[in-house]
Image (cartoon, rainbow, N blue to C red):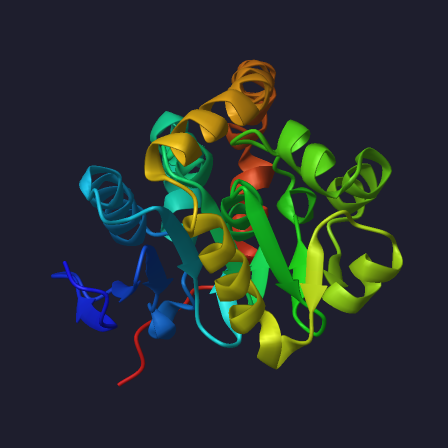
Amino acid sequence: MNDEEMEEMNDDGLVEVERHGRVLVLRMVDAARRNVLSQGLLSCLAREFAAAERDEDTHLVVLAGLPEVFSLGLSREGLLALTGGASVGSTESAVSAPVRCALPVVAAMRGHAISGGLLLGTYADVPVLSDRSCYGANFMRYGISPTAGATYVLGARLGEFLANEMLLTARNYQGAELRGRGVPVQVAPHDEVEDRAMAIAEEIAAAPRRSLILLKRQRTARFRAAVREACLHEVTTFETLMALPETRRRIEAGYPTWTVES
């Protein structure tokens, strides 16, 4: 591949792929459904991350969303399926794709990121947040216990006390507030998030590809082991709560349904 910027839409139309030299940008563009983590979007992301790993010209992946929405988490249909006994395993695997990718991943989290969407972004090696967008983990709003490693990842990325508060209150936090609370991730002015993420990405991508792969493997080994342990502890509580009629009632009554606008 040459170094000229190129853009293509994959077959499902949910993820755009842009090349900037050694940097590959995966942009979630399901605008009609606010980038909820539908099975289609998760499958597209898994496929594109795998393709990036195979491409010797790619040294780093930037994961981005829409200007106002990074991702709003699992779809209503997906949650309701889990109340009926569907396995959470495939969702956990898909949401953690950024850390499982062999290449470094920078998340340009310009838009809102809620629950699974926040996890998706914070599984990246370097997340960049917006000062005006909202970030939260609203599992408890619906009586759902955190899953997909959330009980470990949010504390590791944002700080233990803030993660506890975020999970217990289920409220959203504007990026500017998170910056004021001292989160150890970058929070940039909204319109500068993608430029900041690309600058970081290009700096990282200057290193040899093999060196980046080995460093990421070393740097994420303990993190991934801790995530696996957290998931083992989470699943029993999650399945217990998802089987309760009250949980289904809360989801049906209050969880948004994003539909394609005609």
Q: Position of residue 215 (x, y in %)?
A: 48, 28
Percent position (x, y) of residue 211? 41, 31
Can the viewer see residue 19? yes
Q: Quadrant of the C terminus?
A: bottom left
Task: Point out the residue furthest to the bottom here.
Answer: 262
Up the image or down, 121 lies above or below 89; here it is below
In this rendering, is residue 129 above or below 141? below
Nearer to me, 208 or 41: 208
Using residue 229 as the reference point, say whether residue 53 is left or right of it: left
Residue name at image x 39 percent, y 38 percent: 97
Q: In terms of depth relative to the viewer, which is nearer, 89 or 177?
A: 177
Please tell me which residue lies in front, 87 or 67: 67
User: Residue 196: which quarter of the image?
Assistant: bottom right
**Horizontal and vertical percent for residue 143?**
65, 39
Q: Is residue 232 left or right of residue 213?
A: right
Query: Which residue is at 39% across, 35% downward?
Result: 91
Residue 83 horizontal side relative to residue 19, left or right: right
**Quarter of the picture holding the N terminus:** bottom left
Residue 224 visible: no
